Image (cartoon, rainbow, N blue to C red):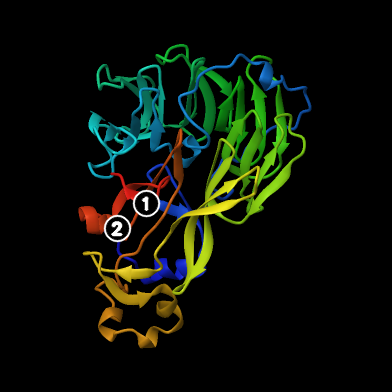
Amino acid sequence: MKKVLILVLAISLVLSLVACNKNNEIINTPSEDDIPTNPIESTSPTVTNPLLFPVERLGFMGGNIGADGLVCGGDDGYIYYRSENDDWKLYKAKPDGSEKVKVSDRMPSNINVLDGWVYFLDYQEGFPIFRVRTNGADETKLTDGCCNNLYVAESGLYFDMRDEKNESHIYRADLDGGNMTLLFPEASLMNYFKGMIYLGATQLGVYDIETGTEKVLAETAVHNVSVDDSGIYYWAVDKGEFRCMNLDGSNDRLILSGGNFFNYCNGNLYYMGISENENGPCHVINRLNIVTNETVTLLEEANEFFNIHGEWVGVTFKQFFEHPETIDPDLMKPNAQGEVEIGESESIYYVFVSSENLYMRCSLRESILQTGKLDCIARLDNGITIWD
């Protein structure tokens, strides 16, 4: 169970937004100290038109991998995910949560599903690439090393890997892990689409695998990059903006200022924003339709404290910061570490898209009431359902 400490809440007061590292611990939003320092060389080649590249099936959707890839839909009607209910093991279930089956005892991230195989990075062994059949058979390690940003397509595996100096380099390998080849040094993989790899993170660039040409698209630190036939979507970290450009890099335009935990997929942008209710400011999960500019709130995070049984303790975040003198002194007593523990609080994260279904790893009071556990996977596309 997550205790809310006074130092953590001080951050919440200004409603700073956070991102997750590979271990899924909450840390500050990526900064230039956290990302590769080697900029992409600025060149001006003619990039091959991605629309001319043969259409291939992908093992991922939208920006799911940039959001750690904890949930992925398969073409067999199952959802593959890292279970919050069983120590982060790899499971599959129907979209409504029925027929849950453990696929592997490993702890996955960057989950891709393609042609009867589940591909993922394994937390326990330091993030090498594994694959296992969707029925749990033939689990195999495909690579060694600390990998990240795994994108699986019919043409192969695309990923980055850290070297002994902790520098990231982008590779390609066959679907069985063979013929691993360095594609681009000293860069992180932001996405893969139609024969192009999108590079970061101090600048956004694109590299044409067939021709070997590269091009700078945006001179800003980037994260949460998604690509489809309509364009390139990305979070410009330095500017605090979510933006879009055409596939050739033209018409770079603003979609949204502010927000965090972005995932663009199929014309919709899912993100965490800020709203307000009777208790004061709160975080919300929104869906923005890029075409109509219509925003729908999918979930509102509770901005008051509750105990380990899910019972409200009668203290809001606003009261804690603005009028602490009105709070029961017994609740304000520091523990042995000098920390003030008021109670539990909710937290929300990335939305994962699977066809028409939406899932999110989060900490919700309703999960305590239903399962006795704070952390869960919730389904968001038809109200709020505690799914796992």
Give, as a three-letter code, the residue at label 1.
Answer: Ile
Residue designated by label 1: 384
Q: Residue at (56%, 31%) from the top-left corner?
A: 191
Query: Is residue 358 something that shows in the picture?
Result: yes
- On the rendered structure, is 335 left or right of 181? left
Question: Which residue is located at x 53 percent, y 62 percent?
Answer: 274
Query: What is the quadrant of residue 40 in the picture?
Result: top right
Percent position (x, y) of residue 315?
35, 77
Identify the residue at horizontal 25%, vertical 83% (top origin): 330
- Reply above or below: 291 against 44: below
Q: Is residue 4 left or right of residue 273?
A: left
**Contact check, label 2 and label 1, Cβ < 8 Å:** yes
- Residue in the picture at 47% in, 65% down: 282
| Image coordinates for residue 158, horizontal then vertical, percent | 51, 23
Q: What residue type is labelled 2?
A: Glu
Relative placement, left or right, of 339 versus 75 is left
From the viewer's perspective, is residue 296 above or below residue 76? Answer: below
Q: Which of marks 2 and 1 is in front?
A: 1
Q: Is residue 15 left or right of residue 388?
A: right
Mark 2 vs mark 1: which is more N-terminal? 2
Q: Position of residue 218 (x, y in %)?
A: 71, 40
How many angstroms separate mark 2 from mark 1 (CA)?
9 Å
Residue highlighted by disc 2:
366
